[in-house]
Each structure stands twice: as structure tokens, then as C-alpha cells.
């Protein structure tokens, strides 16, 4: 695959076009990645689950399949944090169109926990490999696989 154009005045479509992603899809998917992190960190289980297709899957710490299972998973996860807050950061998000309704996404992940009033510390790092699909006109995660680089015990 050829690298994207190096002409900075060519705009967002010039960058995204070699990977088959137009500017509107690119922004919508970046918003999905952000919504996932915000929903996960805040413990909003319904919002979190709606980042996935109805039959969406997440594989990493646990294998979680389907919207109801995703809701239950996030509720347990949030309840187990006690007094800690959580933050997630994704970087180097790369998107590549597979077909009209499917995009592969990859990104780095850093996860942090902290006590209220103090700076958080890194608790885990890894790489997400995602399959995104359109569902009712919206991009959602159909499959997320998290490969951990390391987890603080």
C-alpha cells in the first residue's frame, strides 16, 4: 500500500482516501473510539454496550459476546473499582476499509487508575485490533481484541 499524500494542504480526504475512509466516516469512528473510552471510564454500561453491534464481541481480559453480556460486564467492572477513577487513552488510531460496511481499526491503549484528587498511574498497555461495521447507519465495534503488552498487578 502506498503511503498517504504528503501535501498538507490536500485536507483530510487526501490523507484518508488511500485507506478507503472518507472524512465523515473517519470522524464518526474517532468519535466512537472516544465514546467507548468515556463510557467505560464513567461506568455507563448501556452507553458502553451501544458502542458495539447487537452481537458485538470484546476479547481481552475476558471474552464478552452480545449486548446484554457487555452491559453486565461493564456493571461488574465499574462496581469492582471501589474508590478509584479510571482513564483510557488510545493513540495512533489507524483505519482501513475492508468493504462498504466493514473497517479494520488498530490503536494503542494506555489505561490508568487514580484516587480522587491525585494523578493516575498506568495500569495496563496494549493494542486493540477492531472490526467495525455499520449498524442502523452508525459505525460500531463488531469485534474488539485487546492484546496486552503488560498489566500492573
Image (cartoon, rainbow, N blue to C red):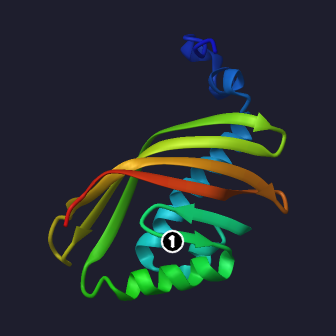
Residue drawn at x 58%, y 14% is: 3
Would you say residue 53 is visible in this rendering?
A: no
Check disc 1 and report the residue beneath it: 39
Q: How many marks?
A: 1
Residue drawn at x 41%, y 80% is: 77
Figure quadrant of residue 49: bottom right
Please tell me which residue lies in front, 51 or 5. Answer: 51
From what the image shows, is residue 18 above or below residue 146?
above
Residue drawn at x 29%, y 57% is: 124
Q: Is residue 144 left or right of residue 37?
A: right
Looking at the figure, which quarter contains the C terminus?
bottom left
Most distant residue in the front direction: 63
Would you say residue 36 is visible in this rendering?
A: yes
Looking at the figure, which quarter contains the N terminus?
top right
Please tell me which residue lies in front, 123 or 64. Answer: 64
Graded by Cα atoms within 10 Å as few (under 14), some (14 to 19) or many (20 or more), the crowding at tag 1 reads some
Most distant residue in the left direction: 118
x, y (%) of residue 46? 61, 81
From what the image shows, is residue 100 above or below residue 57?
above
x, y (%) of residue 123? 24, 61
From what the image shows, is residue 144 above or below residue 64?
above
Please tell me which residue lies in front, 58 or 38. Answer: 58
Q: Is residue 113 left or right of residue 27?
A: left
Q: Is residue 50 left or right of residue 115?
A: right
Amino acid at each position: 500500500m502506498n503511503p498517504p499524500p504528503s501535501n498538507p494542504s490536500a485536507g483530510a480526504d487526501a490523507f484518508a482516501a488511500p485507506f478507503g475512509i472518507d472524512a465523515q466516516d473517519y470522524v464518526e469512528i474517532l468519535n466512537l473510539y472516544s465514546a467507548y473510552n468515556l463510557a467505560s471510564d464513567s461506568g455507563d454500561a448501556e452507553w458502553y454496550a451501544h458502542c458495539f453491534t447487537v452481537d458485538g464481541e470484546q476479547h481481552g481480559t475476558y471474552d464478552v459476546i452480545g449486548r446484554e453480556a457487555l452491559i453486565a460486564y461493564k456493571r461488574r467492572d465499574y462496581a469492582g473499582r471501589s474508590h478509584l477513577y479510571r482513564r483510557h487513552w488510545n493513540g495512533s488510531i489507524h483505519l482501513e476499509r475492508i468493504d462498504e460496511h466493514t473497517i479494520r481499526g488498530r490503536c494503542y491503549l494506555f489505561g490508568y487508575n487514580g484516587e480522587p484528587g491525585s494523578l493516575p498511574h498506568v495500569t495496563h498497555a496494549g493494542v486493540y485490533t477492531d472490526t467495525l461495521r455499520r449498524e442502523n447507519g452508525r459505525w460500531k465495534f463488531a469485534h474488539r481484541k485487546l492484546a496486552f503488552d503488560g498489566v500492573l498487578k
